[in-house]
Amino acid sequence: PRVGGLAVFAGCIFAWALSENPASNFLGILIISSIPLLCFGLLDDLHFKVLPIYRLLAGALSSIIAIIFLETWLVRVDVLGFDHLLFYAPFAIIFTIFATTGVSHAFNVIDGLHGLSLGVSLSASFFLTVLGWVAMDTFIVLLSLVFFMSTLGLLLLNFPWGKIFLGDGGAYFQGHCLSWISILLL
């Protein structure tokens, strides 16, 4: 019951394989960069004892891969004074790694509370779609819709009994990808 995230991951891979639009490159990078997090999370889901430090390092590695291939990081967070520190690329990269790793682990914390993680994923991806639409950013709209539809499929299958959890791997995957879609929107 703890591998529901594989369904979301499979939905994203299916959309990536069948897509012929320019956003599919970004989707591929998000999927590939999330593999370390997904693997370590799945190992933990399958009752292999993975130490938290290794899962934390997997989150940092996934963020580093995303930074390298997407060639972007947080440049502002609209906090007076802190934005000046983000002008320095090394600090901004370290902060981006910290933030995206934190978001992916936060999704793991709320998994297992009867659909809370799926609900947060649905609402986040829906509102990222709306924000992308308002900003007329086709990439963000398409990426967000892929995650919205993949998560919706699992939620509909899971409602109302809640017998399937995203698991660590799925929660990490959702948090990682949604945080990077948010960064791309900026």
Image (cartoon, helix red, strand yellow):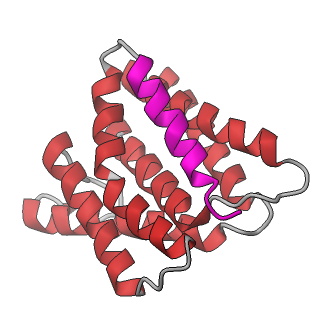
Residue 98 is left or right of residue 5, and the answer is left
| Quadrant of residue 151 within the rendered picture | top right
Q: Position of residue 25 (x, y in %)?
A: 27, 27
Q: Which residues are magenta?
A: 1-18
Which quadrant: the C terminus? top left
Work out whether residue 64 or residue 46 is closer to the camera in this orientation and state it: 46
Q: Position of residue 104 (x, y in %)?
A: 46, 63
| Quadrant of residue 153 within the rendered picture | top right
Q: Residue at x 26, y 53 (%)?
A: 74
Work out whether residue 43 or residue 127 is closer to the camera in this orientation and state it: 43
Q: Residue at x 48, y 61 (%)?
A: 172
Residue lying furthest top in this view?
20
Q: Residue at x 30, y 45 (%)?
A: 32
Work out whether residue 76 or residue 108 is closer to the camera in this orientation and state it: 108
Q: Is residue 97 magenta?
A: no
Q: Position of residue 123 (x, y in %)?
A: 66, 44
Report the predominant secondary structure element of the magenta stretch: helix
Q: Can residue 108 be seen in this snapshot?
A: yes
